Amino acid sequence: MARKQGSHSDITGPKVRAAALSLIARHGCAAVSMRQIAAEVGVQVGALYNYTPDKQTLLFDLMRRHMEKLLAAYAETPIAGTPTQQLEAFTRFHIRYHVPRRDEVFVSYMELRNLSVDNFAVVEGLRRNYEDALEGILAAGEADGSFAFEDRKVTVLSLIAQLTGITNWYRDDGRLTQEQVEEIYCDLVRRSVAAVR
Amino acid sequence: MARKQGSHSDITGPKVRAAALSLIARHGCAAVSMRQIAAEVGVQVGALYNYTPDKQTLLFDLMRRHMEKLLAAYAETPIAGTPTQQLEAFTRFHIRYHVPRRDEVFVSYMELRNLSVDNFAVVEGLRRNYEDALEGILAAGEADGSFAFEDRKVTVLSLIAQLTGITNWYRDDGRLTQEQVEEIYCDLVRRSVAAVR
DNA sequence: GTCTATAATCGGATAGAC
DNA sequence: GTCTATCCGATTATAGAC
């Protein structure tokens, strides 16, 4: 029979990850102590070790989960139509997924260097899957003549850097709404790869 | 009378900054101890404090110097001709300056959050000066009809993120030479802002 | 300018009570 | 599952000899 309520473990585990994510995004992994994370959760430091064997694994879990949730969300997003339409759908998905997740994006990029070799390989593999999705769209547009660019792989990295950079400056109370930002970037992206007629 | 040789101070100071830059780029500011920096320089930890009052100021110096040298190099670069030519010159300058300086770029971006409020304001002001240079080029192209985009300020941030992202993947022994990368990005940048004929 | 020694604090991780 | 107490090593920064 399914439990009707989450156990402490079901509740505290996510709280530990949320606290770690927020603190690490603000100060960096090495600058955040397990004691600070525990204080943010509202427990003592010893309790954290019921949820992670060590600090390194906690960091890795944050990054792996971020990439897996990104891929899962992308898999559920309809990407259809012409390559031009697919590229617009990808652009909108990327912005909508990443902009509300600044902390995850920042940590997943910035703390890569603090992962062990094995953990790094896992996260990089997931990232590569996402890049491959965009590369597939660009390849389709190349094949049917709707896109043109000098190097497909570099274009993939360029577009992702361009789009992810939004998280560095976008603010909910800023000059532009997220919808306006989407329009601006759809325009930039489309034009940068569209075949000249 | 001018000194013919650098004093220890003239030599050790730069060595301290070089060691700090390299280590911080690899591991993050909080993860690098003053002892590690001293070991890399070849002195004991106490000696470092002849060159910086504290670790925070050492980090700030790295970032401030990076931005000041970037602006100085840009000021000496000829940016002339039509807006389209100016944009190409900016693109090539940006790539040529940043790609060989991965550590500086990474630290200057990643460790911003570890600066005090005052130090942050200084670095951000310098960064803003650089962005303004690109914005001026875009404004000129808007004015004479050679460029078209939906939002000039967002386009500035987008282009800079796109170009700076090269430092995350470019390798001297990789598939592409720096010259080839320049060509690819000049193409992407030009097309993303060129007015449609 | 550099060294050694030290102060004072804080770090990750664990053991055992409850 | 959480707490308290603790181990033991590392941290920044300083003082004073040379």
Image (cartoon, coloured by chain):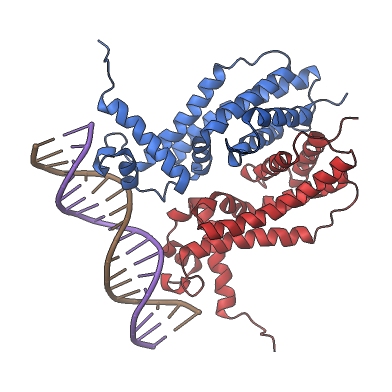
Chain colours: A red, B blue, C purple, D brown
**Which residue: 48% across, 43% down?**
B111
Quadrant placement of the C terminus of chain B: top right
Compared with B180, A126 (above or below) is: below
Taking the image as shown, residue A68 lies to the left or right of residue B172, namely right
Front-most of B42 and A38? B42
Image location of residue B136, percent across then percent down? 67, 22
Front-most of B110 and A183? B110
Image location of residue A152, percent across then percent down? 76, 40
> Could you say which quadrant of the image residue B151 lies in?
top right
Image location of residue B97, percent across then percent down? 56, 27
Q: Is residue A135 visible?
A: yes
> Could you say which quadrant of the image residue A62 lies in?
bottom right
Image location of residue A7, percent across then percent down? 58, 81
**Which residue: 73% across, 30% down?**
B189
Taking the image as shown, residue B86 lies to the left or right of residue B24, namely right
**Which residue: 44% across, 62% down?**
A36
Front-most of B2 and B175? B175
> Could you say which quadrant of the image residue A44 lies in?
bottom left
**Which residue: 61% across, 24% down?**
B93
Compared with B17, A125 (above or below) is: below
Front-most of A119 and A159? A119
Taking the image as shown, residue B35 lies to the left or right of residue B142, namely left
Compared with A109, A189 (above or below) is: above
Q: Residue furthest top?
A: B1
